[in-house]
Amino acid sequence: MSGITLFADSLFSKWGFQDGDVIDDVLYRLHREGRSSGYEDIDDHAVLDALVKRRLLPLVRAALAPNAIEYECIVTCHNPCRVFSVGGERVSHFKDSTPKAVENISVDVSDEEILAAVSEAKP
């Protein structure tokens, strides 16, 4: 399958989005297929952040409304894209703290969307 699926429950886990490597894995595959070059120089966490903000967070915010969520992309060797609070309550990234309202939310992202996000993220 080309592309990826971003799952909302990844936002609530230290190990979500394949421990933060979901974009790197795709970029490596695209590089091997000759569809992308210089993948080693791409900030895959910045690309993931852009895709999460654009495609996944609007669905999560809508599902959790009227509760506000605090989202941040942090510097880490694990999943950088996390929700830190829902409705003012802190989220634990070490246990299953995914709200029931978002358990089944996911969004498919095509290779083309990933490559577009890579182009936007390049300095």
Image: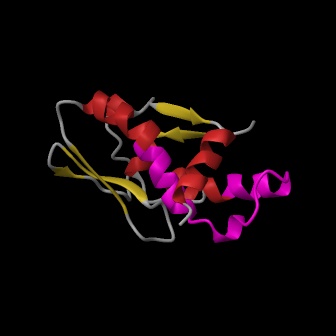
Of 77 and 111, nearer the camera is: 111
Residue 46 on the magenta span: yes
Residue 102, placed above or below residue 98 = above
Residue 74, placed above or below residue 54 = below
Q: Is residue 8 visible?
A: no
Q: Which residues are magenta?
A: 25-53
Q: Is residue 84 left or right of residue 21?
A: left
Q: How many marks?
A: 0
Residue 40, placed above or below residue 119 = below
Which residue: 49% across, 60% down? 46
Judged from this view, the residue extending furthest toward the left is 88
Prevailing secondary structure class for the magenta stretch in the rendered image? helix
Judged from this view, the residue extending furthest toward the front is 123
Query: Which corner quadrant of the image does residue 1 belong to?
Result: top right
Of 97 and 29, nearer the camera is: 29
Residue 117 location in percent, x, y? Answer: 56, 49
Q: Is residue 121 left or right of residue 14?
A: right
Residue 120 location in percent, x, y? Answer: 53, 53
Which residue: 53% across, 41% down? 6
Residue 77 location in percent, x, y? Answer: 51, 71
